[in-house]
Amino acid sequence: MDLGTLCDGRYTGCLLTSSIFDMCRFTLAAFTAALVLASTSLPAEDQLKFSKRKEVSLKDRCDILSSQGKLVMVPKGSILFIPDSLKSKVITSGKPTGKLITWNEFLALNGTWIHMFSVTFDQASGKAKIPQDQLESLGQLNKIVVARRGKNIISVSPKALEPPEKEKK
Amino acid sequence: MKKIISTIIITSTVSSAVEYTNSLLETHFPDPNDPNGFITTELHANIANEDESPGKKGVAYETVYELWATQSDDISVEYKLDTKTVFTGGPAAEITITSADPYTLIPRTRADQPYTVTYSVSDLLSETETDDKRFTSTILYHQGKKANDSIVAGSAREINDNVTAESTQHQPLSLFSGSSTEVHGVITFSMNENVAVDADEFASQSITVLPKHTGSLEGIDEEKIYHTVPSVTINMHNLYPRGDAYLVVFKTSNKGDIEEYRIVQNSQLQNLTQELKSFDPLTISTLNSVIDEKGEWTLQLRVNTPFGDELVDEKQINKTGNIKINVNNVTTQE
């Protein structure tokens, strides 16, 4: 698969291409390529300090919902509310068993106990608050509440869930 | 906030017996000068093998797009297929890697064969516009990962000027130590932010390095003179994808005259896969009908791969004519 981006004519990328079949040879281990490259291949005056961002696996960045042998991954922080009666739907430890499917497929099968809540990007990033009365209403639904923006599942900053400063006082 | 509309285009032409679920993740990094910045992660709800997923969000500061494949029956098995970083006002880059192997789905080469890295960098600002190195330069970095998961660090080089399709040639064994028949791994070139820590990639590409084949011919004693050509066994290991091996014979006096070369029937070993292939020993018992004249003959085990036609092993065999025996003398008849 290859991933292409077109950004209003301003940015084009030439991409890593790989096949799932051929990539089966390699496991994706999280590793940190933190190198101070005073490399023997560079003269002393060209020493570079360079450290790539640490790779984190997809699984470690997601929460996992499970139901009837099906699994779905959602970004950590996107589940806003879990009623006690549905805590078993969220896998918190051990190796999940079941078949991983897409969010749309999982929602179609389990829509009766999942509620999608739309947030703005500013709310997701914590620059804006989610009104407290809305949060209270979500807590009364007795459903697992998942944040979304458009069609995507999105994590929400804890700051967005806090009451406004004046209310705290 | 600069608004960059991005459309993510996903294509795949590979089917696999093992089922995978694809995920497209967008990670939005806040301005590092924002003390309250929160890293927002967004997962696209449904990714098909071929799809187009509009990223409607503006890129606030930096967004990293990642395409993942997770094995549907075992979520601990996952592969990051691609990654792309978009900055507001940042540089853009492209990297491609090619070799003599025309297979395009995943660049690959052999340990003893060169590959070419072509890169472009655009939208770098001049140092008169800003002294922020993130916008005036990038880092071209490469490293290798062997089949045993050990990492071999390459070099990091600062790119300070916009360049278009700059090409450099490399040898796998200049990064990986070992013999060409043993080296097996992946080399990745990436264009990165010029920052000391947590540098993100603008672009990257990897090339798979496969070990060179090994092979041999057995069954011929070059010191002996044969009346009947014995069976010959072909051994072939790690034949390159889409390559084939074959046995060819010719009179030694015709060496170099390809038209006199005879490919031995049923001696071909074909690798029709996209993986290395090793074969069980193949015994050829019909050489006596091919080597049909007395004299010195040469047997060659050859391979044909994207890198050309190559000799693997060679044996000489001396075949004699009829032997006449009488009571008192043993002679050979010309």
Image (cartoon, coloured by chain):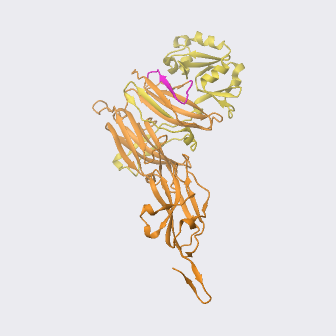
How many marks on residues?
Answer: 0
Q: Looking at the picture, does residue A145 appear above or below residue A56?
A: above
Q: Is residue A104 at all visible to an observer of this figure?
A: yes
B53 drawn magenta: yes
The picture places residue B146, in percent across and down from the top left corner, at: 52, 49
Which residues make up the magenta segment?
Answer: B45-58
| Residue depicted at x 39% and y 41% | B140
Q: Is residue B203 above or below residue B59?
A: below
Please provide percent x and percent y for residue B327. 62, 88
Is B107 placed above or below B329 here? Answer: above
Give the letter of the yellow chain. A
Position of residue B2 measured from the top left corner of the image (x, y, whole percent): 39, 21
Furthest toward the left, the residue is B128
Which part of the image, by quadrant, shows the N terminus of chain B? top left
The residue most toward the bottom is B328
Give the quadrant of residue B88: top left
Position in image of residue A60 (x %, y %) = 59, 33
Residue at 56 percent across and 19 percent down: it is A148
- Between residue B243 and residue B92, name the one nearer to us: B243
Q: Which chain is orange?
A: B
| Magenta stretch: dominant secondary structure | loop
Q: Residue at x 61, y 64 (%)?
A: B285
**Residue A39, magenta (yes or no):** no
- Tell me where residue B191 sits by quadrant: top left
